[in-house]
Amino acid sequence: MLQALKQAIADIDMPAPSQPFAKQRGKMRWPIKGKLSHRFGSQRNAEMKWDGWLLNANEGVAVKAIHHGRVVFSDYLRGYGMLIIIDHGDSYMSLYAHNQVLLKETGDWVTADESVAKVGNSGGRIEHALYFEIRHNGKPTNPKHWLASR
C-alpha cells in the first residue's frame, strides 16, 4: 500500500502556472547575480562553443530556479559537477552546473526564484561559478532571450 501511495504522489501534476515558460520569454530572473564570463555561442576551445552561460560568483551563493518545474536530475555528472536540471514543461529545461551543494532532489517540484543549489566549483572548475543553460527540445538556446535585462 505504501508503495502504491508513493507512486501515486510521484505522478501528481503540478497546478498550471500563471504563465507557461514560453510566455515568460525575456521576463525571467537570472539564477544568480554573478558576472557573465562566457556567453552562449562564444568559443570554448578549438572544437567547441559555449551552449550556455558561465556566471562567476562567490562560493555558496544561492542558485535560484528561473521558472517553476520539476527536478529531473540532481546529482554529480562528469564535466558538469553537481548538476540540477529542471523540466519546465513543453520541452523546456534549465540546467545549473558546478554547484557546491544541491538543495533539491530528483522528483521535487520547485517554484520560480526558489533556491535549488549553492554556487561552487565542482566538476573540475578552479574558480567558483555557475554554468547555466536553457534547452528546448533538447537543443541549447541563448539565455539572453529568456532572462530579463539587468
Image (tube, rainbow, N blue to C red):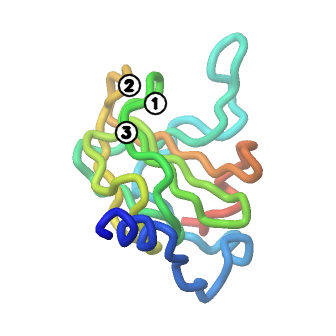
Q: CA distance from mark 2 to mark 1?
A: 5 Å
The residue located at (36%, 56%) in the rendering is: 63
Disc with the residue nearer the chain's start (1 vs 3): 3
- Badge 2 local density, few (<14 within 10 Å), some, or many (20+)? some
Q: CA distance from mark 1 to mark 3?
A: 10 Å
* Secondary element at tag 2: loop
Name the kind of residue labelled 3 in the image: Asp
- Badge 1 local density, few (<14 within 10 Å), some, or many (20+)? many
Give the farthest residue toward the front.
1
Asked if the residue under mark 3 is in contact with the one under mark 2, i.e. CB atoms within 8 Å, the reply is no
Is residue 1 placed above or below 62 in the rendered structure? below
In the image, 98 versus 138, the foreground residue is: 138
Residue 75, disc: 3
Q: Nearer the viewer, mark 2 or mark 3?
A: 3
Is residue 131 placed above or below 122 in the rendered structure? below
Residue 66 relative to residue 139: left or right: left
Name the kind of residue labelled 2 in the image: Gly
Disc with the residue nearer the chain's start (2 vs 1): 1
Q: Position of residue 29 (x, y in %)?
A: 51, 68
State the residue position of label 2.
123
The residue located at (59%, 46%) in the rendering is: 133
- Badge 3 local density, few (<14 within 10 Å), some, or many (20+)? some
Q: Position of residue 28 (x, y in %)?
A: 57, 70
